[in-house]
Amino acid sequence: MIESKLISICIPTRDRVSELEENLRTISTISRRAEESGFSIEVCISDNSTSNDVESLVSRWAEFPLFELHYFTHGEDVGAARNFISALRMACGDYVLLLGDDDYLHEDFFDNLSRAFEDKDITLAFFDRVSISLEGEVVSIDQFSSESAVMSGEQDLLKYIDRSHVLGALGAFISSVVYRGEALRKALESIESINYSSPYAHVEVVAWLVLRERFVYVNSALVYATCDNDSFLSKGYLKRIAIDLEFINCWRDQGASAEILDSLQRLLLRERSWLMFVKAKACCGRKAVQDFFSTSDAFSAYHFVQYIPYLACLVALFLFRLKKKIVRLFCAVRPSERILIVQNYPAPYRVALFNKLFKKIDFDVAYLNPSPSERLWDKVKDDIRYPYLQLGVEQNWLLNQALVSTKLIGMLGGYRKLLVFTDPPNFFSCAVVSIAARMKGVTRLSWVSLWDGYQVNTSSWVTTLLARLYVYVGLRAILSGSTKAIGYCRSSDELARSYGVACESSSQYFPLAEVYGDAKSKSGRKEGPVRLLVISYLSPRKQVEQAIRCVNSNDEFELCIAGVGGEEYVQSLMRLGAGNERICFKGYVNPSQKSELFEWADFLLFTTSRDSWGYVVNEAFYNGVPVVGSDKAMAVKDLVSEARNGFVFGSEEQLAETLKVIAREISMQDDFLERMSKYAMGTIVDFNAGVESRFEKLLAD
């Protein structure tokens, strides 16, 4: 471990208050490990906003000094590049990280930082990242290069570029670079002028250091990076390529040799592909793209483009000759009374539902995508007891949609009914097959997974408008002419009805009997504090800290927390509950242990900030446990009846008041919990039976 050092976390921001607040919350959580890892923290915020919202946020955080907090505002929009450099100039630390306001420190941040700077001569370190969705789910682990290495000089740099996969390996992604503070300040003083018209102005600092000093690449993640939130994409993907060419210009400005520049051009081609450069040249015509075509030896593949029309003619002729084979492949004849169900991918709960339905109804299921790899659902196919087809296999979205649409249209002639699942990524193929079914006279049914008020938001108003138009047109094509629909939840019903389609709720079936046996309710309760149970994946989105704070302030309750999650978040929860004997942590629990916890609990506590459903609510009810749940979860909104099988709250203050009501009612009514338990069990038994009967009616009519 290196000696105690100050790490400056520099955050440039502009009008993204919610992302910045989440970032500060993450830093405060991980800061508790700073001292034991040999670090102290200062946070430097450079504000490029046009409002005072960020300043107000910083003022609130300054009242609780978990770390040094410095704030500077430009008072006007000076551009992202100037704001990046301004943030770096604020740093006083021994080590400096330029952190995007929507990127969050990895739980191993300090360990990886210590490892990178063990060599005292290292002036700069590159790291990998973990990409997450806007909902906080892990999407991918992005490895920028093939292996960790300490480097110095041009030959080492050339080898490193050749081993790298993306420009992020050389600082294009701002949050993957840590500077030694002394070297950074020397670079900022030495660079004669920085081109602030380039979005990659910070790369000039990176290039200056790498070309002159010793640096390292560490094959470990430093941060969690939010996907689908790239401000450089605001003008479109093709113009994004022109922006990336500015990255190479930054290296040219700092004296990189022709060999290094050519190697960087080859790296850019590996990341973006030559075909995208052809499109960029045709569509946006940026001078940087034109120059790249005319000067880059790496782009010799461009000359191949002149042969594309001839190749297209050959492919068309080949497909025409194979017409009969294609028709036989896509238009296989099937029994005329069968039903085709179009789904996104195999999911355990829908597989369980289809297995039960197939005992009574004859149907096939067409899956448009493989199961998400991060959900580890591929093995669920072993449980399938009905005929299914896996249509989608391509990684390219457009190609996958085109192939899937062609196959579905060819299959339609063999079915009397079509049930389409409204999944936004597959709207194109679902809309195409819905229109084709209408033309062929196939009865159309819809399974609505979206909800009333569903909105798509992207990094720019143009792409947001196009995405919302895509959703609207897709839903219109799928729902228009549908005979009936079934909704994911009650709010989905409202959405379907707004399109003029009769819809029933709900479709959220889970195979509870297979896991827990018969449904059960509780009789009476043991003396002592009221027992609250949290079963959840432990992440900031679940807001479990609310439960701990409420129990800390109310000695009439005890709390058991079961589940795993990010190490830092779990440790922060444990510290929050430390010293309170009425709070315990169980970690991971298997189904039999979960059943024991439900038997122990008086109430399930579900504090999530957002959930499209919330399976644990179904589980709790099936085991006779009433639920105290957040109104941000669809399962709570659809299943919980106030003071009958649980309680609904909207904020932490409301939760605290609800717990006081529960304690009072239990003290006044001996059968209070027993009545709620029976009602909870009855709710879910009726609900599950209702889902089965609704699907049977939908498919059989």
Image (cartoon, grey):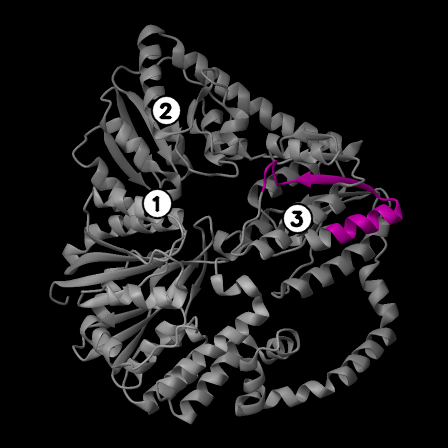
| Residue situated in front as seen by the camera: 232 or 102 | 232
Residue 438 % position (x, y): 84, 46
Task: Mark 3: give few (<14), some (14-19) or many (20+) Cα within 10 Å.
Answer: many
Can residue 449 be found in the magenta stretch?
yes
- Distance Cα–Cα, label 2 vs label 3: 35 Å
Q: CA distance from mark 2 to mark 1?
A: 26 Å
The x, y position of residue 5, in whole percent, is 14, 64
Q: Earlier in the sequence, mark 2 or mark 3?
A: 3
Q: Residue at x 42, y 78 (%)?
A: 164
Dividing the image into 4 quarters, which one contains the C terminus?
Answer: top right
Q: Nearer the viewer, residue 332 or 238?
A: 238
The percent position of residue 550, horizontal first and vertical second, equals 28, 28
> Element at badge 3?
helix
Q: On the image, numbered disc 2 is attached to which residue?
A: 654
Residue beneath the point at 49% across and 28% down: 636
Q: Which residues are magenta?
A: 431-454
Q: Nearer the viewer, residue 156 or 410?
A: 156
Residue 165 location (% of width, % of height): 45, 76
Which circle's residue, 1 or 3, is located before the other in the chain? Answer: 3
- From the viewer's side, name the closer residue of 617 and 378: 617
The residue lying at 77 percent from left, 53 percent from top is 432
Mark 2: secondary structure: helix
The circle drawn on residue 564 is 1
The amino acid pointed to by label 2 is Gln
Q: Is residue 39 left or right of residue 637?
A: left
Quarter occupied by residue 113: bottom left
Reply yes or no: does residue 632 show up in magenta: no
Mark 1 or 3, which is nearer the eye? 3
Q: Residue at point 56% right, 64% down?
A: 235
Q: Residue 161 has which mark? A: none
Image quarter of the N terminus: bottom left
Give amino acid for label 1: Val
